[in-house]
Image: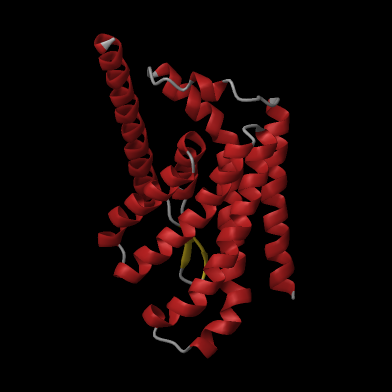
Amino acid sequence: MKKTAAVSASAQNTSATRKLVILALLSAIGFISMMFIKIPVVSFLKYEPKDIFITFGGFLYGPLAALACSVVTSLLEMPFSSTGLIGMVMNIISSASFACTASLIYKKRRDIYGAALGLVCGVAAMSVSMLLWNYLISPLYMGVTREQIVPMLSSVFLPFNLLKAGINAGFTILLYRPFLRVLHLCGYPVSEHLEDKKAPVFVVAGVSALMLAVCIGVVIFLNRS
């Protein structure tokens, strides 16, 4: 019986170690992608794909894992950012609102539809939360008044966050299962995730394209208003 308990404890330790390794890997990839992929979009705001990898961690291990990846990635980013601690807080809020929301819903329904619904809600959660935090925090590092920030909320910040989150949502849908296959080939035990309800490739691609198209449509509409 003691031997069985020891084997069980050893298996749990191995599982926890693998989980930490995967989450550390995703945080590192998110940080590296942020450092090397920065695409100017509007004003001083740039698109970067780190939230894709943070969401992978959430889809694998739940919203708390997504939160942990958000914090670690933002901490790694802080020394290279001109916004310091304020920027780090905003990065955590942005990534966590997107990835944790998506992960929480995907945890309840582990298929393409649960992932799509979770990501759509993640796009909405990130966009709304960043409106609030840009209103409250942006004046502190931009050196402007809140009255000057208000017009930028609908003309700059909301379109940018919708577009950024929409792109990341689309790529998350497209790349999550291939990412699982890579982990499986590397010997990580993710077969239980690969057994989640599958969807045909055209459905995955269609859902991804639709999500991105809707976000782009909203951005165009906001810019015309």
Task: Answer left or right for 120 relative to 87.
Answer: right
- Of 96 and 32, the residue lying toward us: 96
Q: Residue at x 29, y 16 (%)?
A: 5
Give the total of numbered labels. 0
Q: Report the quarter where the C terminus lies.
A: bottom right
Q: Report the quarter where the N terminus lies.
A: top left
Where residue 36 appears, x then y in whole percent?
37, 49
Where residue 96 appears, x then y in whole percent?
47, 54
Instruction: Determine if residue 82 is in view.
Output: no
Q: Residue at x 63, y 75 (%)?
A: 154
Location of residue 84 with respect to 48 vertically, above or below: below
Where residue 100 appears, x then y in whole percent?
51, 49
Where residue 113 appears, x then y in whole percent?
70, 37
Instruction: Determine if residue 28 is in view.
Output: yes
Task: Answer left or right for 132 relative to 19.
Answer: right
Location of residue 104 with respect to 134 vertically, above or below: above
Quadrant of the image occupied by residue 25: top left
Q: How is the model colour-coded?
A: secondary structure
Task: Answer left or right for 7 relative to 96.
Answer: left
Q: Residue at x 57, y 38 (%)?
A: 107
- Of 92 and 150, the residue lying toward us: 92
- Residue most extreme to the front: 1
Q: Residue at x 57, y 79 (%)?
A: 152
